[in-house]
């Protein structure tokens, strides 16, 4: 009996000691490792600006956010001066494994064929590592990569980033997009049509759509991308409903490439989570998007962006530039008009660049941020643009519990830009500080 009492006492003492050690370890883990200080902060969740801002970071999480917070001795101070701290930016529509020549937009079908026929998935994943790093260093800490990545190349890149093999943004991946016969290719000979399945999964009826979703999930997809528009055929409403039902049953969201009244209506009636592009869309479809809380991802550009892209590194004459501006003017005005209608009706907006074309004198990250200028020209306020690129995008991706706003316990994905982006949204194009998950990526202070 005495030995039993000694054993019990020893066990209790051991447990107490272990508790003390564990408590000390937890305390050390929760100690702030960084204190980021700047003139102002926009947290992504409200319309207010925090002055004399301080963000405390502990490990990979945000510990505290506020004005003039006391800085503990354990924290390394990063004083960014006259800058604005924001949540890491989110690009809801990327193609990191594709890069086409932007100087001839009429040859995109040919460019896509060239990429699929001449670049292995491994090569495209390596390209994606380069472009992903450029995105991250520009302040884009999360992307939703929606296809055009070969056979599961996007999943390979996502896993490489997650494993720390290469630097890059957090990735939501779709694997191959689902589409009707032909995908987004132009007319191909029967022999060449075998290439289509290297880029798209062809849907041949509702049950085929369900099976395609299951295969995508098995391959590692964290969202499903559908090309509703086709040439000559499009995905049908019955097929879309089956795809959406299967994806939602698995808790995965659906992004629909849809342009025009027919395609956007099919996507909205099927209950997708986002409609990409929608350059042409009716008010009644926009109202349906409001009712169903379907996000619009407007992948727009300014007139200057399209003209500069089309000339590449060549300096055009004044006459050439004027002619090119006339070519793009109607398309740009149409995009602005539909975005104004969507905003007025209350359609939720998530920012997405759809940047897969080369831009002269810019890397992928820099070019991807030009979309904010297009939103501003369409009438969005700087705060609305910031919300579209942070809080709204996080919700669309289903990651609002982890990213998108600067709040305690969320991942420390933090950027800072010079000056005040509420005065000039182009400040978002010049990140001077980037942190992803508590690790400093860029500090140009």
Image: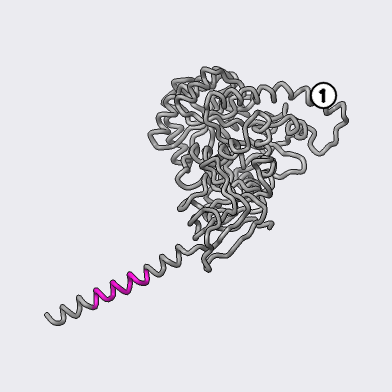
Where residue 12 appears, x then y in whole percent?
A: 24, 74
Question: Where is residue 401, by image quadrant?
Answer: top left
| Residue 220 spot, x, y in % from top left | 47, 43
Give the quadrant of the N terminus. bottom left
* SS category of the residue bearing label 1: helix
Which residue is at the front of the view, 188 or 131?
Answer: 131
The magenta stretch spans residue 11: yes
Residue shown at the point (63%, 46%) measured from the top left:
135
Q: Would you say residue 6 is visible in this rendering?
A: yes
- Nearer to me, 378 or 98: 378
Q: Which residue is mark 1?
A: 323
Give the magenta-colored segment's residue range.
10-22
- Taking 119 as reference, is 33 above or below it? below
Across and down, in percent, residue 363 comes to 71, 45
Q: Position of residue 78 (x, y in %)?
A: 61, 60
Quadrant (top left/top right/bottom left/bottom right) for the C terminus: bottom right
Left or right? Give the position of 428 relative to 19: right
Residue 175 seen in the current view: no
The residue under the point 51% across, 17% down is 284
Query: In the rendered structure, does residue 334 fall within the stretch colored magenta?
Result: no
């Amino acid at each position: 009996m005495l030995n039993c009492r000694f054993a019990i006492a020893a066990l209790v003492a051991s447990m107490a000691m272990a508790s003390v050690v564990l408590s000390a370890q937890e305390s050390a883990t929760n100690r702030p490792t960084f204190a980021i200080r700047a003139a102002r902060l926009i947290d992504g969740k409200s319309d207010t600006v925090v002055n004399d801002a301080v963000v405390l970071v502990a490990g990979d999480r945000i510990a505290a956010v506020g004005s003039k917070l006391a800085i503990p001795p354990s924290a390394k101070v990063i004083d960014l001066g006259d800058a604005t701290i924001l949540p890491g930016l989110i690009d809801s529509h990327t193609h990191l494994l594709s890069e086409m020549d932007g100087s001839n937009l009429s040859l995109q079908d040919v460019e896509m064929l060239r990429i699929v026929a001449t670049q292995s998935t491994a090569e495209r994943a390596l390209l994606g590592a380069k472009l992903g790093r450029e995105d991250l260093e520009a302040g884009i800490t999360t992307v939703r990569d929606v296809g055009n990545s070969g056979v599961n190349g996007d999943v390979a890149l996502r896993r490489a980033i997650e494993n720390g093999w290469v630097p890059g943004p957090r990735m939501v991946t779709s694997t191959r997009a689902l589409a009707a016969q032909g995908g987004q290719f132009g007319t191909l000979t029967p022999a060449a049509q075998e290439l289509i399945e290297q880029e798209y999964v062809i849907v041949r009826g509702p049950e085929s759509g369900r099976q395609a979703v299951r295969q995508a999930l098995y391959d590692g997809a964290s969202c499903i991308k559908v090309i509703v528009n086709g040439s000559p055929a499009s995905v049908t409403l019955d097929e879309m409903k089956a795809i959406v039902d299967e994806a939602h049953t698995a808790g995965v969201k659906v992004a629909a490439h849809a342009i025009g009244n027919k395609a956007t209506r099919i996507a909205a009636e099927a209950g997708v989570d986002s409609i990409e592009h929608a350059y042409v869309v009716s008010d009644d479809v926009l109202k349906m998007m409001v009712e169903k809380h379907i996000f619009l991802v407007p992948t727009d550009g300014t007139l200057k962006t399209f003209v500069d892209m089309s000339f590449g590194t060549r300096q055009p004459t004044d006459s050439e530039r004027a002619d090119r501006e006339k070519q793009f003017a109607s398309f740009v005005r149409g995009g602005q008009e539909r975005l104004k209608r969507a905003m007025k009706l209350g359609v939720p907006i998530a920012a997405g660049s759809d940047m897969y074309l080369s831009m002269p004198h810019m890397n992928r990250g820099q070019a991807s941020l030009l979309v904010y200028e297009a939103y501003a020209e369409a009438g969005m306020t700087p705060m609305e643009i910031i919300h579209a690129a942070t809080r709204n995008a996080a919700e669309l991706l289903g990651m609002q519990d982890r990213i998108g706003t600067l709040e305690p316990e969320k991942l420390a994905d933090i950027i800072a830009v010079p000056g005040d982006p509420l005065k000039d949204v182009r400040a978002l194009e010049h990140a001077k500080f980037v942190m992803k998950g508590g690790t400093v990526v860029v500090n140009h202070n």
